[in-house]
Amino acid sequence: MDCGMQLMHWTQLENDHPDDASSPHSVYAARRRANPNTTRVLIADDYADAAKSLAMLLAIAGIETAIAMDGEEALAVAESWHPDICLIDLLMPKVDGLAVARRIREQDWSSRPLLIALTGRTTAQDRHSAAEAGFDHYMMKPADPATLVRTIQSYTSGDRCPCTACDTPYP
């Protein structure tokens, strides 16, 4: 299903090291300085209403989005569009969110996208699996819209992700 590009973010995981020059924080801060007016967010979720609502919310905040309705489409969009941030549902058809994260992490792109698991799955094992797959954050559905936007804006400006915006911080 092709939703097309539309104009229109989390639990902190152990992969997030703000003082490391290769961390997403420094990568996003550098990207933001280079082009301060555009943040690209890929929303990968098979629930169309949720994906479209999130895209509209982010558009209001001035964030550019693309929607993918399954894991296969998410990988294709990520490869061609190189988003700054990927919001990925863990349970999607064709390719699940964990596999999507692993495959994105295998890419040799010039900048490392921030990966956020956006899911209804709640167990500690789910969080652990997400961290192992390469997710930087884990956010429970339904995500608070204000927290989501605030977290994206904080992260892309190079600020440390506020733990109050996170579901469950990881060490």
Image (cartoon, helix red, strand yellow):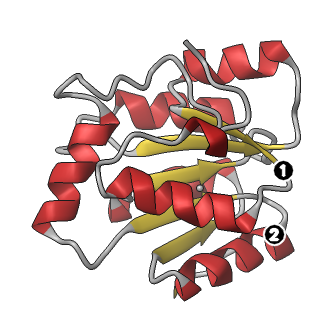
Does any portion of residue 8 appear in the rendered image?
Answer: no
Q: Quadrant of the N terminus?
A: bottom right
Q: Residue at x 24, y 24 (%)?
A: 19
Does any portion of residue 164 appear in the rendered image?
Answer: yes
Q: Residue at x 44, y 62 (%)?
A: 153
Pick whichever of labels 1 and 2 is earlier in the sequence. 2
How far across and how far down the image is residue 141, in percent? 84, 50
> Which residue, as the protein is rendered here, is positioned at the far left?
34
Left or right: where does residue 4 sit relative to residue 156? Answer: right
For label 1, count other residues whose C-alpha is less than 10 Å away and answer few (under 14), some (14-19) or many (20+).
some
Q: Quadrant of the C terminus?
A: top right
The amino acid sitting under disc 2 is: Ala
Mark carried by residue 83: none
Left or right: where does residue 36 sit relative to residue 114? Answer: left
Q: 76 and 169: which one is in front?
A: 169
Examine the image and state in which quarter residue 97 appears.
top right
The amino acid sitting under disc 1 is: Lys
How far across and how far down the image is residue 123, in percent? 88, 20
Q: Secondary structure at mark 1?
A: loop
Look at the picture and state if 46 lies above or below 63: above
Q: Residue at x 53, y 54 (%)?
A: 151
Residue beneath label 2, please?
Answer: 50
Look at the picture and state if 5 lies above or below 170: below
How far across and how far down the image is residue 62, in percent? 45, 83
| C-alpha separation, residue under disc 1 versus residue under disc 2 | 10 Å
The answer to whether the residues at label 1 and label 2 have Cβ atoms under 8 Å apart is: yes
Residue beneath label 1, please?
Answer: 141
Q: Residue at x 26, y 79 (%)?
A: 37
For label 2, count other residues whose C-alpha is less than 10 Å away and answer few (under 14), some (14-19) or many (20+).
some
Look at the picture and state if 100 lies above or below 57: above
Q: Secondary structure at mark 2?
A: helix
